[in-house]
Image (tube, rainbow, N blue to C red):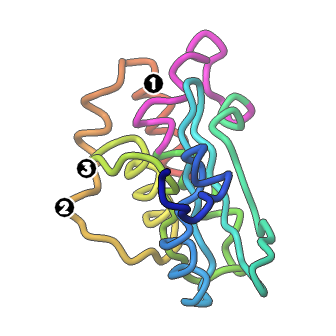
Amino acid sequence: MKGIGRTIKRRRQEAKTDYGSRLVMLKSGKPRLVVRRTNSQIIMQVVSSDLAQDKVVSGISSNALLEQGWPKELKGSLKGLAAAYVTGRLLAEKVKGKVDGAILDLGMQRNIKKSRIYAAVKGAIDGGLKVKMSEEVLPTLDEIKKRSNEKVQKVFDKLKDK
């Protein structure tokens, strides 16, 4: 007979929530910059917590770039480095005056240096949101431009300079 152990929480078992890191973030009392990556877009939110009740201060997805001048024929590139960076810039503009700083919440995603997630964080930092982050994990603007095609570079430059 096997020993009786603790029941694993459903969201942990589904690999959706890391309760240990969530508790640390909640105890800090600071808002969280939540960055999620899907197969087709980047989703960013600034979330504040009060008594473990999450409240979304503001959020944006890279689909909003289509309204900002991103070419319709490049809809498939809404998940790339340039789209992630510009999405971060747009979110920082939306929360200006509401939130001063935030803690990065990656959730259960893999932590890969200079990835799309960190490009989104760099966009938020460049847009004025204070996020404590090591510069070596963030991609440079040159790396972001180098890894995108010419049409995306033109739109990227135009939206970045806003």
Q: In the image, is residue 130 above or below residue 148?
A: below
Which residue is pictured at 61% across the width and 17% down the height? 75
Q: Residue furthest front?
A: 1
Q: Which residue is mark 1?
A: 152
The amino acid sitting under disc 1 is Val
Examine the structure image and report whether residue 150 is included in the region drawn in magenta: no
Q: Earlier in the sequence, mark 2 or mark 3?
A: 3
CB atoms at circles 2 and 3 under 8 Å apart?
yes
Q: Which residue is mark 2?
A: 136
Q: Which residue is mark 3?
A: 113
Q: Secondary structure at mark 3?
A: loop
Q: Secondary structure at mark 2?
A: helix
Percent position of residue 65, x then y: 65, 35
Q: Nearer the viewer, residue 140 or 3?
A: 3
Alpha-carbon distance for marks 2 and 3? Answer: 8 Å
What mark, if any, has residue 99 been given in the picture? none
Among the 4 quarters of the image, the one containing residue 22: bottom right
Alpha-carbon distance for marks 2 and 1? Answer: 25 Å
Which residue is pictured at 77% across the width and 85% down the height? 50
Q: Main secondary structure of the magenta part?
A: helix
Q: Residue furthest left?
A: 136
Q: Secondary structure at mark 1?
A: helix
Percent position of residue 54, x then y: 77, 71
Q: Which residues are magenta?
A: 67-84
Among the 4 quarters of the image, the one containing residue 39: top right
- Total numbered labels: 3
Q: Residues within 10 Å of mark 3 (few under 14, many from 20)?
A: few
Q: Nearer the viewer, residue 109 or 33?
A: 109
CB atoms at circles 2 and 1 under 8 Å apart?
no
Name the side, left or right, on which 101 lies relative to 146.
Answer: right
Q: Earlier in the sequence, mark 1 or mark 3?
A: 3
